[in-house]
Amino acid sequence: MKLQTVEYYFREVLVSMIRNRWMTAASIGTVAVSLFVLGVFLIIVMNMNKMASSLESQVQISVYINDGLPEEGRKEIERMTKDLKSVSAIEYVPREVALKKLQERLGENKKILDALGESNPLPNAFLVTVNNADDVKKTAEAIADLYGVDEVKYGQDVAANLFELTHLVRFFGAILMVLLLCATIFIISNTIRLTVFARRKEIAIMKYVGATDWFIRWPFVLEGIGLGIIGGGISAFALQEFYSAMAEKIYESLAFFPMVEQYPFMNYVTIALICAGILIGILGSTISLKRFMEV
């Protein structure tokens, strides 16, 4: 492509954007608002996924050992549990430590344990963490079959409901993102179509004098890319400020809420939004031009 032709394309883009400045502003605004909404939903879905993963990782299996089991038996249970591929960590909690933790958890109400005197009804136990939350049930069943294990608990009903909820969040979040992206492309392609419609006579004249389809298309495609970059940049900047303010407000009241760290997450979101703006600009221009190129 000749340098003069490239200069002509960019000059046409600049002239078109200035000449149709209100339509240009409307297109940029539409891109910015649409991508901002898309970005907000992306942030929500990613943080809900982070929260779901955090809740899943906190599900532990409590393995209670038979009273009177010798030390060799306890070590054998620990060894065989560690050998399970699904197990990521195991912690031994003697009954003395378990009682102390219970007293700390009760706080001012720990006096209710005074009735126990010197006796300790809590069993020795292991706390087992698995690699994948979906493996909790089968891992618990495998451990329960080991000799010397009295009981295995992991909050079966709560865990099952939690896993079902997290799967629904991820599934519907992905569907929502796809639908919103399609709606954004539809809105922007119709916005750009208005710009093309305003210049339909100019396109027809260029066709009649022998201009090739791509010679006519390139200025509109470049204009769509320009609108997408500007709109994507505006939405990315607004999202940076929005996420920063949202994170600050949440951490003020919920300091341990598992949010996705702002950086580098928001840098990836910025890149994604600008790329989405470029893609939407190209698709919008191409879709809008198709009808008016048939002369």
Image (spheres, rainbow, N blue to C red):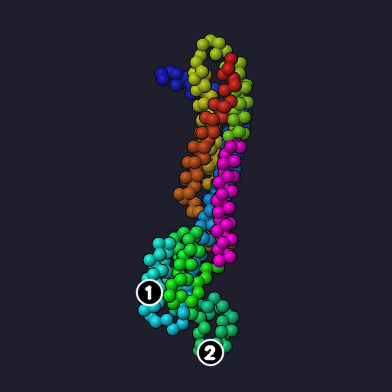
Question: Is disc 1 placed on a helix, strand or loop?
Answer: helix
Residue 249 vs residue 128, the one in the foreground:
128
| Residue drawn at 56 percent across, 61 percent down | 160
What residue is pinned by disc 2?
117
| Quadrant position of residue 179 | top right
Point out residue 29 in the picture as x, y percentages from the top left corner. 60, 35
| Residue drawn at 52 percent across, 37 percent down | 276
| 214 left or right, relative to 37 | left
| Quadrant position of residue 38 | top right
Quarter of the image for the C terminus: give it: top right
Which mark lies nearer to you, 2 or 1? 1
Magenta stretch holds residue 149: no
Quarter of the image for the N terminus: give it: top left
Label 2 or label 1, whichever comes before in sequence order: 1
Asked if residue 275 can be seen in this view, the reply is yes
Asked if residue 20 can be seen in this view, the reply is no
Q: Main secondary structure of the magenta part?
A: helix
Residue 172 vs residue 195, the one in the foreground:
172
Magenta residues, as a range? 156-184
Point out residue 66 in the picture as x, y percentages from the top left corner. 46, 79
Residue 19 vs residue 85, the one in the foreground:
85
What amino acid is labelled 1 in the image? Glu
The number of callouts visible is 2
| Residue drawn at 45 percent across, 18 percent down | 5
What residue is pinned by disc 1?
76
What amino acid is labelled 2 in the image? Gly
| Residue drawn at 53 percent across, 53 percent down | 49
Q: CA distance from mark 2 to mark 1?
A: 32 Å
